[in-house]
Image: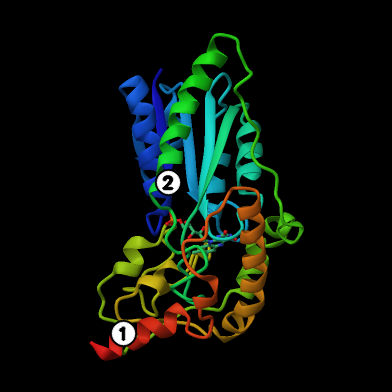
Amino acid sequence: MKTAIIFFSQTNNTLKVAEQICDGIFEDTGQCDLLKMEEVSAGSLTDYDLIGVGCPVFYFKEPFNVRHFIEGLPQQKNKHWFVFCSHGAVMGQTLLSMTKCLEKKDALVIGSHHTYANITVPFYPKHTLTSGHPDDLDLREAFQFGKAMVKCSNAVYSGDTSYITKPSPVHENWAKDGGNLLTHALLSQTIPRLSINLETCIQCNECQNSCPVNGIDIESDPPRIQEPCIFCLHCASICPSCSIEADWSPLVKMAPANYARYKEALNDAKDRGEFRWLIDPETVDCSYPLHKQREHEIKDD
Ligand SMILES: Cc1cc2nc3c(=O)[nH]c(=O)nc-3n(C[C@H](O)[C@H](O)[C@H](O)COP(=O)(O)O)c2cc1C
């Protein structure tokens, strides 16, 4: 059996999970290739029998670049696939959506896995409800999932389909349609317009180099920013001089109400045995979002 795991990851949560799944598969088969999605061409997967694809959850679904990647694959008849994701409080319909996309390519999706992880966006606090995840236990579960996928794939190739599992259903009604409603068009109106402050920009090119869709060109005049865009806001979260600016205030204002819903969702997940609190939720301070915190850190330096 030849296996590959393809991942997209910006703050390394999905990468950590992907590495563990890869190690689990390697332990049982002696081979597993770990591939960055940005470096995989759609037609290059013909040699693999089992392929995993994993990503963060953005706006209750797989990020737009991941969806486009799957949509661009050739037919996958007779290939076994599995899907996985890392996410904050609410996974929404990510695993279901990725599965459906792959099934349109005739792939057989044999399993899925999700992992709670911390969330990094400029308008939410840095110390957040899911901080501390993925921890060792989450990563051990990912390792075991890798082994389970080998067992399942071998069984299916020998005619036993009893180990195939379907993705978990969406538990929160309010998140059920979120991913469908938050279209690219709607997000482009809702997410604040980013701009580069050329007086403070240090031309380090980090935003340009880390944009997953090559949506930034700071050398052009005026600089091209956010075109195309998947609204990951990674550029604004990482800019070392905080020169990618936006009016975050509407989203910061919404944070306490969102966090109340997220806390409820996490308590429900805890009751289902899917989530463990690693921080005290009362210590999360929505009035001190990441972008303010980073600005203070830069001033203090
Ligand atoms: C723009 C953006 C949107 C996000 N939307 C969601 C979401 O709808 N639900 C959720 O549970 N987490 C959400 N998250 C949190 C990420 O899914 C989580 O931090 C993930 O582990 C990041 O993975 P990475 O480190 O591999 O990039 C979002 C993060 C970003 C940056």
Residue extending farthest to the top is 158
Mark 2 touches mark 1? (CB < 8 Å): no
Residue 73: in sight, yes or no?
no
16 horizontally vs 186: left or right: left
Expressed as whole percent of the image width and height from the top left, the position of residue 89 reads 58, 60
Expressed as whole percent of the image width and height from the top left, the position of residue 150 reads 46, 23
Is 268 situated above or below 29? below
250 horizontally vs 295: left or right: right
Q: Quadrant of the C terminus?
A: bottom left
Amino acid bearing label 2: Leu
Is 147 situated above or below 247? above
Which colour style is shown?
Answer: rainbow
Element carrying mark 1:
helix
Residue 116: in sight, yes or no?
yes
Front residue of this view, candidates 145 and 39: 145
77 horizontally vs 220: left or right: right
- Identify which residue is drawn at 67% across, 57% down: 268
